[in-house]
């Protein structure tokens, strides 16, 4: 387990966002149990991008043996009359 700081729901109620550590993830404790992880927004965005990249790589891997379709056939140009 990581050594993130912990904050309680009571801390948040008493101190608001000042209870959150600066630029660092923290465990949120509710009723003496780990409930959630609070992460800085920039870290969250980075994690979401990594997940999207991973999903894209999975899709590419799953489709690598499918037959190829020429670009012109997949996206035919509209001919002007």
Image (cartoon, helix red, strand yellow):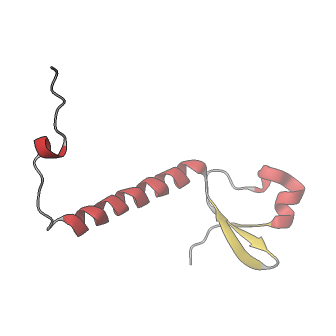
Which residue is rendered at x = 82% and y = 77% of the image? 31
Residue 8 in the image: state x and y as whole percent: 80, 67
User: Number of callouts in the render?
Assistant: 0
Which residue is rendered at x = 84% and y = 62% of the image? 11
Give the quadrant of the N terminus: bottom right
Residue 58 versus residue 32 in the image, above or below: above
Residue 76 versus residue 15 in the image, above or below: above
Residue 28 versus residue 15 in the image, above or below: below
Using the image as rendered, state which of residue 13 and residue 56 is in the foreground.
56
Does 1 sit left or right of 11 as displayed? left
Residue 56 in the image: state x and y as whole percent: 32, 59
Which residue is rendered at x = 11% and y = 62% of the image? 67
Does 33 sit left or right of 72 as displayed? right
Which residue is rendered at x = 10% and y = 48% of the image? 70
Residue lying at the far top of the rendered structure: 81
Give the quadrant of the C terminus: top left
Q: Which quadrant of the structure image shows residue 24? A: bottom right
Residue 21 in the image: state x and y as whole percent: 69, 55
Using the image as rendered, state which of residue 44 and residue 6 is in the foreground.
44
Residue lying at the far front of the rendered structure: 81
């Amino acid at each position: 387990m990581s050594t993130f700081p912990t904050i309680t729901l009571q801390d948040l109620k008493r101190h608001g966002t000042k209870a959150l550590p600066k630029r660092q993830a923290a465990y949120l404790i509710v009723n003496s149990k780990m409930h959630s992880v609070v992460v800085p927004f920039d870290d969250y965005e980075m994690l979401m991008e990594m997940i999207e990249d991973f999903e894209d790589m999975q899709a590419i891997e799953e489709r690598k043996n499918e037959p190829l379709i020429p670009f012109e056939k997949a996206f035919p140009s509209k001919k002007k009359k």
